[in-house]
C-alpha cells in the first residue's frame, strides 16, 4: 500500500492549490497549474471550452470509460458597486456563509491584472463608533471591502482601475496541524482535487493501470451549478469526489469517508453506492453513508444535462462547510483508498 508514503505529497499539493485564487469564473491560474502537473506526470490532458481540465488514463480495457471528478472553483465575491466614500459593495459567487467573512483579508483582482489587498468589514465595524456594531446583520447589504490604498471617494477607487465585476478573493488561511487537521477555506473541494492528483502520481510512478479507461476531471463551475455538465460524453459511470458533511444528525466524522446516498436532487445510483460500501468493507476503509438535503454536486449537473451515466458521491468529512472548514488526514486517506478500490487498482 503506497498511500502513507504519499501523504506529504498530498499535503504539499493541496496547500499549493488552496493558495491560488479561483472563485467560479476566475479559474485560469488553478487550471493552468493542474494541467502542468498532469503534463509533468506524462498524462494526456486538455481543457474543454468552458475550462474543465480532463486528464486521460488508459485502462487495461479501453472499451468502456469511467470518470472521477473534483472541482477546483471556489466560493468568492465580486465588486457590485463603489460607494461615494471609496468602499466596495459586494455580491457573492456561490453561497459562502457571509457572517464568517466579517474582518477577513482579501485581494481585489482588476481586469488589467492589478491586485490590491483589503479587508471585508461590516458597515458598522467599530464598537466605539456604531451603536449597532454587535447587532448589524452580515449580508450583502451590510458588508463592504475596505481597500488598503489612500482612497476617500469613488473617483479615487476608479483611478486604481477597480470596477464593478472585479473579483474579490478572501484569504483561505490554510493550516496543516501537527495533529493531522487541514484547516482552510475552500477545502470544498480543493483537497479532493489534490487527492485525484495524488492518485494520478501513485499510478504513474508505480505503473498501475485501472481496469477501464478513466478520465480524471477537474471542473470549474460546480459552485454555481453546472460543473459536471460538460464532462466526456462516453463515460458510463462517474465517481464524484467532493466534501462529506459533518454535523446535525449526520453520521460522518472528519476521520471518515462519506458515501452520499441522497442529496437535494435525489438518490445516487443504488448499485454504485452498494458496490462502494462493499469495497470499503472488504478493504478495511472507514466509510459511512449519509443524506445531504442541502447539497448538490457535479453529478447533479451531469444528469440535468441529459447524460446516460450512473453516478455516486464520496468525500472526506468536512466541518463548517462554506465557512472556515476543517478535515483530517485520516478522512482524506480513507477517501483516496476508496477511489483506488473503485478503479480496481492495487495501491
Image: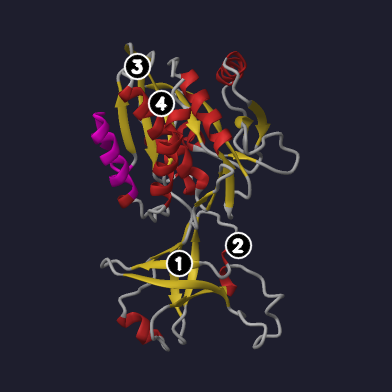
Inter-mark Cα distance, 1 to 4:
35 Å
Disc 4: which residue: 67
Inter-mark Cα distance, 1 to 2:
13 Å
Inter-mark Cα distance, 3 to 4:
14 Å
Disc 3 and disc 2 in contact, CB within 8 angstroms: no
Residue 103 belongs to magenta span: no
Count of numbered tags: 4
Disc 3: which residue: 209
Q: Earlier in the sequence, mark 3 or mark 4?
A: 4
User: Is residue 68 positioned above or below 225 on the image?
Assistant: above
Instruction: Look at 62% across and 28% down and name the residue there.
Output: 267
Furthest-right residue in view? 249
Q: Earlier in the sequence, mark 1 or mark 4?
A: 4
Closest to the camera, between mark 4 and mark 2, is 2
Q: Position of residue 66 (x, y in %)?
A: 40, 21
Say which element carries label 2: helix
Q: Nearer the viewer, residue 142 or 60?
A: 60
Q: Earlier in the sequence, mark 1 or mark 2?
A: 2
Instruction: Look at 43% across and 27% down and name the residue there.
Output: 307
Q: Earlier in the sequence, mark 3 or mark 2?
A: 2
Inter-mark Cα distance, 3 to 2:
43 Å
Bounds of the magenta segment = 30-51
Q: Earlier in the sequence, mark 4 or mark 2?
A: 4
Instruction: Look at 50% across and 50% down and name the residue there.
Output: 186
Q: Left or right: 113 with respect to 2?
A: left
What number is the disc on residue 106? 1
Disc 4 and disc 2 in contact, CB within 8 angstroms: no
Say which element carries label 4: strand
Amino acid at each position: 500500500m503506497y498511500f502513507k508514503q504519499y501523504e506529504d505529497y498530498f499535503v504539499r499539493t493541496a496547500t499549493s492549490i488552496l493558495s491560488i485564487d479561483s472563485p467560479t469564473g476566475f479559474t485560469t491560474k488553478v487550471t493552468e497549474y493542474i494541467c502542468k502537473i498532469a503534463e509533468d506526470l506524462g498524462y494526456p490532458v486538455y481543457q474543454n471550452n468552458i475550462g474543465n481540465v480532463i486528464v486521460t488514463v488508459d485502462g487495461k480495457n479501453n472499451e468502456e470509460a469511467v470518470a472521477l471528478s473534483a472541482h477546483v472553483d471556489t466560493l468568492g465575491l465580486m465588486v457590485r458597486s463603489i460607494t461615494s466614500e471609496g468602499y466596495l459593495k459586494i455580491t457573492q459567487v456561490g453561497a459562502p456563509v457571509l457572517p464568517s467573512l466579517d474582518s477577513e483579508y482579501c485581494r481585489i483582482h482588476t481586469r488589467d491584472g492589478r491586485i490590491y489587498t483589503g479587508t471585508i468589514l461590516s458597515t458598522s465595524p467599530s464598537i466605539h463608533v456604531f451603536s449597532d456594531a454587535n447587532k448589524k446583520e452580515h449580508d450583502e447589504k451590510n458588508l463592504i471591502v475596505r481597500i488598503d490604498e489612500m482612497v476617500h471617494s469613488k473617483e479615487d477607487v476608479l483611478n486604481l482601475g477597480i470596477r464593478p465585476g472585479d473579483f474579490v478573493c478572501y484569504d483561505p488561511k490554510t493550516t496543516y496541524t501537527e495533529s493531522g487537521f487541514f484547516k482552510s477555506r475552500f477545502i470544498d473541494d480543493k483537497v479532493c482535487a489534490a487527492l485525484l492528483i495524488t492518485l494520478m502520481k501513485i499510478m504513474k510512478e508505480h505503473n498501475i493501470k485501472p481496469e477501464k479507461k478513466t478520465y480524471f476531471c477537474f471542473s470549474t463551475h460546480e459552485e454555481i451549478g453546472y460543473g459536471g455538465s460538460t464532462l466526456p460524453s462516453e463515460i458510463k459511470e462517474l465517481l464524484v469526489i467532493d466534501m462529506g458533511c459533518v454535523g446535525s444528525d449526520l453520521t460522518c466524522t472528519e476521520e471518515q469517508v462519506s458515501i452520499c446516498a441522497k442529496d437535494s436532487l435525489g438518490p445516487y445510483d443504488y448499485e454504485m453506492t452498494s458496490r462502494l460500501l462493499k469495497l470499503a468493507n472488504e478493504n478495511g476503509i472507514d466509510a459511512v453513508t449519509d443524506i445531504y438535503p442541502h447539497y448538490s454536486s457535479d453529478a447533479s449537473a451531469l444528469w440535468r444535462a441529459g447524460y446516460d451515466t450512473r453516478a455516486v458521491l464520496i468525500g472526506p468529512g468536512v466541518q463548517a462547510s462554506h465557512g472556515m472548514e476543517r478535515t483530517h488526514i485520516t478522512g482524506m486517506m480513507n477517501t483516496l483508498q476508496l477511489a483506488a478500490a473503485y478503479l480496481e487498482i492495487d495501491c
